Amino acid sequence: MSNWKGYEFLVFGALLFVVFILLALWIGKKAKEKGYSRVGFTIFALFLPVIALIVVLVIQPTQAAQDKSLVKCSQCAEAIQPQAKRCKHCGIEIPLTLINAPSAT
Ligand SMILES: [Zn+2]
């Protein structure tokens, strides 16, 4: 470290800064996906990046975020993950074409 030239330190600092900003933005995006304030978590990450990262990874999604991300099974009408290939409630296999189609009921 001690024999680093000034510009090398600047480049390293700039790179670190960019990574830091991207991390803060990513934490904000992740928080929003889980139903929390994007701006709030981005600011949180700018001050306490490590803690914000841990919090956003372990925090439980809000009920509203969970409901929004789930789709209804066409067979039993239970909420299931949109990525699911088989309903966990009734065991029906879900054709990919039906997942985004409007419900007929
Ligand atoms: Zn089902």
Image (spheres, rainbow, N blue to C red):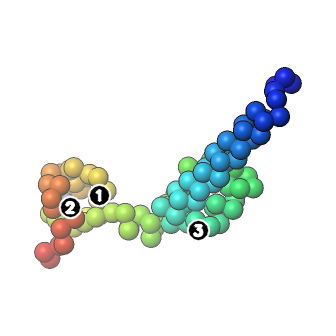
- List the residue tagged with mark 3: 37
Residue at 18% across / 68% down in the picture?
101
Question: Residue 56: x and y, percent?
Answer: 58, 53
Residues marked 3 and 1 touching at CB (< 8 Å)? no
Based on the displayed image, in which of its 4 quarters is residue 72 positioned?
bottom left
- Dots 2, 1 in contact, CB < 8 A: yes
Q: Position of residue 83 (x, y in %)?
A: 29, 52
Quadrant of the image containing the N terminus: top right
* Residue at image mark 1: 82
Q: How far from the left and from the top, in percent, is residue 19?
A: 63, 45
Q: Is residue 6 visible?
A: yes
How many dots with numbers?
3
Outermost residue toward the top in this view: 3
The kind of secondary structure element at disc 2 is: helix
Q: Is 13 left, or right, of 79 in this rendering?
A: right
Q: Which residue is mark 2?
A: 99
Q: Is residue 53 visible?
A: no
Alpha carbons under labels 2 and 3: distance apart:
29 Å
What amino acid does circle 2 point to?
A: Ile
Residue 8's spot in the image, x, y percent?
76, 33
Marking on residue 29: none
Label 1: state its secondary structure.
loop
Query: What amino acid is at disc 3?
Result: Ser
